[in-house]
Image (cartoon, rainbow, N blue to C red):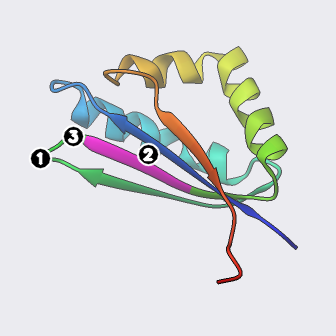
Amino acid sequence: MTTVRVLLESTVKADQSTAAINFIRQNLPNVRSFEGCSQVNILFDKDQRTMLFDEIWTSPEHHQRYIESISKSGVMTTLVGFLEAPPSVKYLYASSL
């Protein structure tokens, strides 16, 4: 089965690191249990306030359905409130190199 790696990178506001981490920790089970999600890891550089979501999904469509769901529920609005700007999103596929 082909999967897609989804990378979301963002910068957390200077005074929001702890709140952002707590919010994400509370919501990770919802992401991990969403249909099509195989894996989610969060990487954080405290000095640069850079946060990277490293996710594996069945397809971009599954990920986009998840984004739609959290956009409708307000989770996305709350998450983006901790960030300097909305995250950049990249869809990457395994290479045969």
In the rendered image, residue 1, in percent from the top left (x then y), is placed at: 88, 73
Q: Are marks 3 and 1 in contact (CB under 8 Å)?
A: yes
Q: Image point 41% across, 49% down: which residue?
A: 52
Name the mark on residue 25. Answer: 2
> Does 47 sit above or below residue 12?
below
As drawn, the label of residue 58 is none
Q: Give the amino acid at mark 2.
A: Arg
Q: Which residue is mark 3?
A: 49
Mark 3: few/some/many CA within 10 Å (<14, 14-19, 20+): some
Q: Are marks 3 and 2 in contact (CB under 8 Å)?
A: no
Q: What is the C-alpha distance between the residues marked 3 and 2? A: 16 Å
Give the total of numbered labels: 3
The residue positioned farthest toward the left in the image shown: 47
Q: What are the residue bounds of the magenta stretch?
A: 50-54
In the rendered structure, which amino acid carries the disc numbered 1? Asp
Q: Quadrant of the C terminus?
A: bottom right
Q: To which residue does mark 1 refer?
A: 47
Q: Secondary structure at mark 1?
A: loop
Q: Which quadrant would residue 85 be assigned to in this image?
A: top left
51 inside magenta stretch: yes
Residue positioned 65% across, 43% down in the render:
30
Residue 57, percent from left and from top: 73, 56
Report, in whole angstroms, how far the alpha carbon at label 2 lies from the one at label 1.
Answer: 20 Å
Tell me residue 37's x, y (percent).
73, 55
For marks 2 and 1, the one nearer the N-term is: 2
Callout 3, which amino acid? Arg
Dot in front, 3 or 2: 3
